[in-house]
Image (cartoon, grey):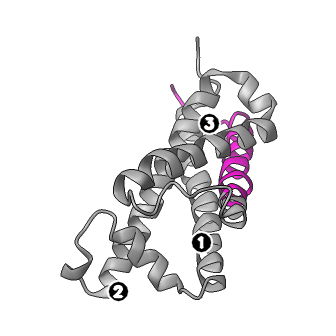
Amino acid sequence: MESSYSGKALIRAIVIATTIAGTLDILSAFVFAIMAGGSPLGVLRGIGGAIVDSESYDRFVLAGIGLALHFAIMTAMATVYLLVASWIRLVNRLAVLSGVGYGLVLWGVMYWIVLPRRWPTMFPIDPTREPKEIAMQLFSHIVLVGIPIALVARAAARWRFASDTY
């Protein structure tokens, strides 16, 4: 089976999807943090603290590490979706529905596997005790990440470049 994307379209789509979804997602994290009395710098430091000892770094360096990690994770999320969409054409035909499904999958992986492994006492959040928190998480993963990535993937299937030879 042949991919529905040209090589350059796939790379371009990964960059665009990462930029859009990554920016929307981190901005939502900032807004939710501010609503809870936190700060954007605290969000970024928290992300950076997931992979390095937060006591060993200046707070701004740690925030930079957090921002880089956030976009690295988003690159992986966009790449996985685009690779699947490049082989399964139905995913692009049902882009919004596929984006909703992918957002749900990403939420499940993040909040039931990734975060509990790093912070086992904080995650997973009990949905019966924190429905507002769950709703905000789902909104971010579905509306701000899954659907934008899916819409970029659908558009990318139509991109062609004169210099594409593969």
Name which residue type carries label 1. Answer: Ala
- In the rendered image, the quadrant that contains the N terminus is top right
Residue 155 forms part of the magenta stretch: yes
- For marks 2 and 1, give the one nearer the viewer: 1
Which is more foreground, mark 3 or mark 2?
2
Marks 3 and 2, how far apart in space?
43 Å
Residue range (magenta): 138-166
Q: Report the front residue among 129 and 36.
A: 129
Amino acid type at circle 3 is Ala
Task: Identify residue type, mark 2.
Answer: Phe
Q: Is residue 24 magenta?
A: no
Q: Secondary structure at mark 1?
A: helix
Q: Earlier in the sequence, mark 2 or mark 1?
A: 1
Please rate how many residues cluster around mark 2, counting C-alpha atoms within 10 Å: few if below 14, some from 14 to 19, many from 20: few
Residue at the spot 45% in from the left edge and 63% down from the top edge? 122
Residue at which label 3 appears: 162
* Secondary structure character of the magenta stretch overall: helix
Numbered circle sitting on residue 93: none
Residue at numbered disc 1: 29
- Which quadrant holds residue 104? top right
* Among numbered discs 3 and 2, the one appearing first in the sequence: 2
- Rendering coords of residue 69 (x, y %): 39, 62
Establish if 8 lies above or below 116. Answer: above
Q: Position of residue 6 (x, y in %)?
A: 59, 31
Percent across and percent down for residue 135 are 72, 60
